[in-house]
Amino acid sequence: ALLAEAHAWMGEHDTVIALAEQVLEACSPSERSFWDVLGPLAFVCAERADVDRFEALVMRMLDAFEESDPTRSLIAVARVGAQGLGLGAAHANAGLAELFDRLSQVASLSEPRDQAIVHRYRAELALSQDDLQGHMRGFVASTHAFWSAGMERSAVNMAGNAGYGYILLGRYEDAHELLLAARRQAETRGVAILADYCDHHLAMALHGMGRLDEALARQRSATRVFAERGVARIEGHGRINVAQVLLELGRPEEALAEVDRVVALAETSVPSLSA
């Protein structure tokens, strides 16, 4: 499970899947490794927009949670649920939210790491319900809890997510400042995948600030990275952002070319992009 976690941070999806399948085959739901490997596997599902694999993962969790300690199960549900909310797997996500509420009544969250993971899931749930203030509160609380737990990479990741929250609130300058700081931290710690996500969101902040040429350059660069990594969901959203900036720059033909690529991704990889 620890190896799967490490490879997830490095963006090595195939290795994560192989390791996760080995662990799930070898371990029973009464063992910690069974639950710990679900988070990295769910991350890969989200990165690849692999709804089928994600739904199968959730069904396995729903069938197995009674065989495990409730706190361990709750943390796994929170980790998996935070990844799934952007996938559009409505039935699976509803099952996870219901199980989360049930386990929250009996689990004990004494460790900062556990508190951080739960705060993060609640932040994502708030966003899915259009509660932007709750979304921000959750990410700020998660960031602080991860720092308290000494989990620096996760804290930087949450800071980047909080920057995206500022974008949703229209606070583009605050987003820009926070995302730049998070990106520097990610680079310092050698976590390229976090720096790439920061670039994706920094482009959105620059767009909101009216710095269109900078936004275009940064978004194209970030989108190219996600395309090379095979992260179709983020590539698609990046191309949508590029198209919007190009339209504002008076370059409709280039914008249309980006939209055509998004349509192709929606047809082959990420159906939710068609919305």
Image (cartoon, rainbow, N blue to C red):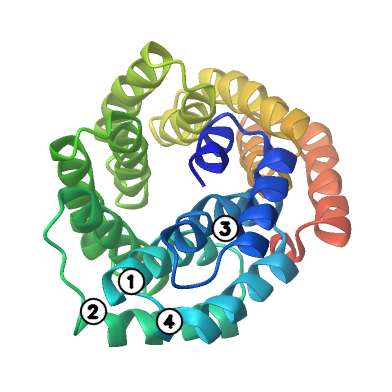
- Residue that mark 3 sits on: 42
Residue 275 visible somewhere in the drawing: no
Gap in Å between the C-alphas at discs 3 and 1? 15 Å
**4 vs 3, front mark:** 4
Q: Earlier in the sequence, mark 1 or mark 2?
A: 1
Which residue is label 4 attached to?
A: 67
Q: CA distance from mark 1 to mark 2?
A: 7 Å
Quarter holding the C terminus is: bottom right
Could you give the CA–CA distance between mark 3 and mark 2, rounded to whole angstroms? 20 Å
Where in the figure is residue 211, as x and y percent of width and height? 46, 23
Residue 176 seen from this side: yes
**Residue 128 position in % (x across, y down):** 42, 70
Vertical order, 167 against 176 (above or below): below
Identity, as a three-letter code, of the amino acid under mark 1: Leu
Position of 149 relative to 25 (above/below)? above
Residue drawn at x 61%, y 34% is: 245
Residue 104 image label: 2
Foreground disc of the pair 4, 2: 4
Mark closer to the chain start, 4 or 2: 4
The image position of residue 17, as x and y in percent, is: 70, 49
Distance Cα–Cα, label 4 vs label 1: 13 Å
Q: CA distance from mark 4 to mark 3?
A: 20 Å
**Mark closest to the chain's N terminus, 3 or 2:** 3
What amino acid type is highlighted by mark number 4?
Answer: Glu
What's the residue at 32%, 32% (across, down)? 156
Along the polypeptide, which appears first: circle 3 or circle 1? 3
Answer above or below: position of 124 versus 258: below
Mark 1 surroundings within 10 Å by alpha-carbon count, few (fewer than 14), some (14 through 19), many (20 or more): many
Residue 1: image location, x then y, percent: 52, 47
CB under 8 Å between discs 1 and 2: yes
